[in-house]
Image (cartoon, rainbow, N blue to C red):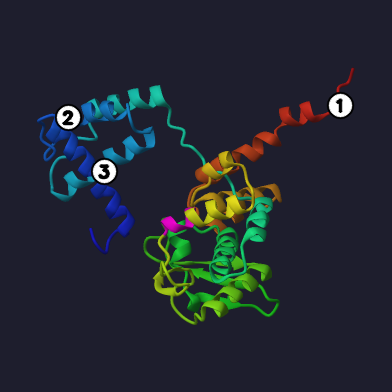
């Protein structure tokens, strides 16, 4: 699979199938090839500890490994479909949505970033993440050479590859003049002229590493920034690597930008996920919410 799929996808397949294999070994069953009854029982067992989306992903991993080894997939059988349906009816398929880092939240986080080297990086990362609607893996892979600064101070950035663009057609994204300023301050202070824009630091020295920041670090940076800004811990807990992406989509929808433009800005191929991101805002703008907001007639 190497070269045909992203490293994250391969890692996910490996981790999910390892869990299935360990369950089979413990229960004295065969993981390769697995019978439909085994997979169905695994799905039911997993429902006690895993979310519906996780179970669905693990079933996909089982099917993929079987196909790679030219074995009949046990997943697309009536036994597994019925077991999965039972889980979905019991647990529901709705996934928890990340807290959207909307413009007002973003400004609070940016204001709280210190003026040292780490603070300059964090400020630039949050600003760029919001403007580009990049997923965390896309954000840390942005390259200095792909930045273009326009005459009015704004900029464009090429996102070379994304989750929905596995063949690297790429997409251009917009950077505001304010974001370009934050980005240039970071690059100058870190003395970076080429390579990855966002990088980590050596533990005991405020020295910038040569390689790109790890995607998991994006969440930590957001949470640290939220704590500095004094946000409620319940809100901080809901922050994720998608928070900037969710918040920007919500702000664009609130500004009246049409769905097609939002999809283009975020690199979405389907409108389904965008609608999930903006549904909370839509509820607040719904006819019933507006009715209750009006003065009583009596």
Residues at discs 1 and 2 in contact (Cβ within 8 Å): no
From the image, tell me which residue sits under label 3. Answer: 16
> Could you say which disc has been placed on residue 259 in the image?
none
Please provide percent x and percent y for residue 276: 54, 40
User: Where is mark 1, residue-wise?
Assistant: 295
As measured in the structure, the alpha-carbon distance from the residue carrying label 1 to the one carrying label 3 is 54 Å
Label 2 to label 3, Cα distance in Å? 15 Å
Task: Tell me, yes or no, whether the highlighted magenta stretch contains residue 230.
Answer: no
**Closer to us: 286 or 221:** 221
Whichever of labels 2 and 3 marks the residue nearer the N terminus, that label is 3
> Helix, strand, or loop for circle 3?
helix
Residue depicted at x 68% and y 80%:
151
CA–CA distance in space, label 1 to label 2:
60 Å
Residue 216 part of the magenta segment = yes
Mark 2 is surrounded, within 10 Å at the Cα level, by few (under 14), some (14 to 19) or many (20 or more) other residues, namely many
Q: Nearer the viewer, residue 83 or 237?
A: 237
Secondary-structure class at tag 1: loop
Magenta region, residue range: 215-219
Q: Which mark is residue 38?
A: 2
**Residue 236 placed where, x, y %?**
55, 45
């Amino acid at each position: 699979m190497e070269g045909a799929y992203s490293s994250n996808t391969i890692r996910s397949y490996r981790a999910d199938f390892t869990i299935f294999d360990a369950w089979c070994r413990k229960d004295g069953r065969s993981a390769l090839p697995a019978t439909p009854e085994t997979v169905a029982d695994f799905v039911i067992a997993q429902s006690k500890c895993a979310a519906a989306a996780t179970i669905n992903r693990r079933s996909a991993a089982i099917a993929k490994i079987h196909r790679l080894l030219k074995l009949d997939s046990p997943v697309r059988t009536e036994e597994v479909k019925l077991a999965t349906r039972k889980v979905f009816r019991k647990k529901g398929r709705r996934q928890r949505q990340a807290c959207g880092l909307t413009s007002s939240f973003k400004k609070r986080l940016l204001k709280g970033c210190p003026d040292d080297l780490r603070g300059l990086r964090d400020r630039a990362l949050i600003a760029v993440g919001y403007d580009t609607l990049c997923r965390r893996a896309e954000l840390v892979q942005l390259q200095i050479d792909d930045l273009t600064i326009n005459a009015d101070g704004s900029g464009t950035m090429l996102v070379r590859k994304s989750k929905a663009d596995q063949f690297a057609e790429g997409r251009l994204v917009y950077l505001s003049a304010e974001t370009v300023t934050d980005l240039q301050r970071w690059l100058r202070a870190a003395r970076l002229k080429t390579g990855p824009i966002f990088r980590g630091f050596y533990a005991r020295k405020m020295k910038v590493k040569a390689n790109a920041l790890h995607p998991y670090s994006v969440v930590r940076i957001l949470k640290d920034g939220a704590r500095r800004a004094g946000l409620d811990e319940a809100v901080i807990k809901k922050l994720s690597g998608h928070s900037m992406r969710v918040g920007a989509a919500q702000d664009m929808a609130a500004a009246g930008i049409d769905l097609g433009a939002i999809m283009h800005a975020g690199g979405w191929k389907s409108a389904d996920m965008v609608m999930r991101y903006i549904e909370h805002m839509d509820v607040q703008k719904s006819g019933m919410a507006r009715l209750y907001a009006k003065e009583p007639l009596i």
